[in-house]
Image: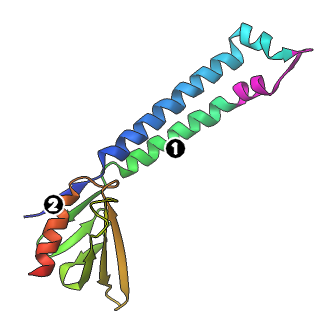
Amino acid sequence: MAITAPYSQYKKTNFKIGIVLLLIASVYFFYDGKYNQKFIGKHTSNGKPDSTLVFNQKAPPYLFAGAVVLAILFWKNKDKKIVADEQDIIFSCGHKIPYNTIESINKTKYESKGFFVIEYKSQDGQKKQCKISNRGYDNLDSVLELLVTKITG
């Protein structure tokens, strides 16, 4: 039976909050920089805008672009997951770590910091490490439990 650890709800929520904040800031600065006559009058002296007004006029496209970039990153990452099946641990990028190549699992910081490190041998014989954090994936308790049972026997 395969156990799945989907992309963290924590990270998904942070992407959504960032997108909303950037869109709100973009609209707010656009309104103040172009249409709010009281704000424009307050930040204009001798017919020249001060730095605050210039910022409010020039920032909205960059803030909107930042929201678009976050939306693209969110869309790319929303389906990331780790699957621990009977033979391998499989990452959504296609990387597989067979259980028989895993040499150790360091879970000393899992309770306090929320991550564990898998040390394994790659196909070319090099020792490699893979750090997996509960901030990146949900349901890691079950995945770690399965890994430990597969490694220990």
Mark 1 vs mark 2, CA separation in Å: 33 Å
Q: Residues within 10 Å of mark 2 (few under 14, many from 20)?
A: some
Q: Is residue 72 above or below residue 85?
A: above
Q: Which mark is residue 138?
A: none
Q: Nearer the viewer, residue 71 or 14?
A: 14
Image quarter where the C terminus lies is bottom left
Residue 129, image quadrant: bottom left
* Residue 97: x %, y % from top left: 26, 76
Q: Nearer the viewer, residue 97 or 115?
A: 115
Residue 45, image quadrant: top right
Image quarter where the N terminus lies is bottom left
Single out the residue that lies furthest toward the bottom.
Answer: 125
Figure label count: 2
Instruction: Please tell me whether mark 1 or mark 2 is closer to you in this view.
Output: 2
Q: Are marks 1 and 2 in contact (CB under 8 Å)?
A: no
Q: Residues within 10 Å of mark 1 (few under 14, many from 20)?
A: few
**Residue shown at the point (80%, 28%) measured from the top left:** 51
Residue 52 lies in the magenta stretch: yes
Helix, strand or loop at label 1? It is: helix
Three-letter amino acid code at disc 1?
Val
Residue 33 visible to an observer of this rendering = yes
* Residue 146: x %, y % from top left: 13, 68
Q: Is residue 21 above or below residue 42?
A: below
Single out the residue that lies furthest toward the right.
Answer: 46
Q: Which residues are magenta?
A: 45-58
Q: Which mark is residue 142?
A: 2
Helix, strand or loop at label 2? It is: helix
Residue 84 visible to an observer of this rendering = no
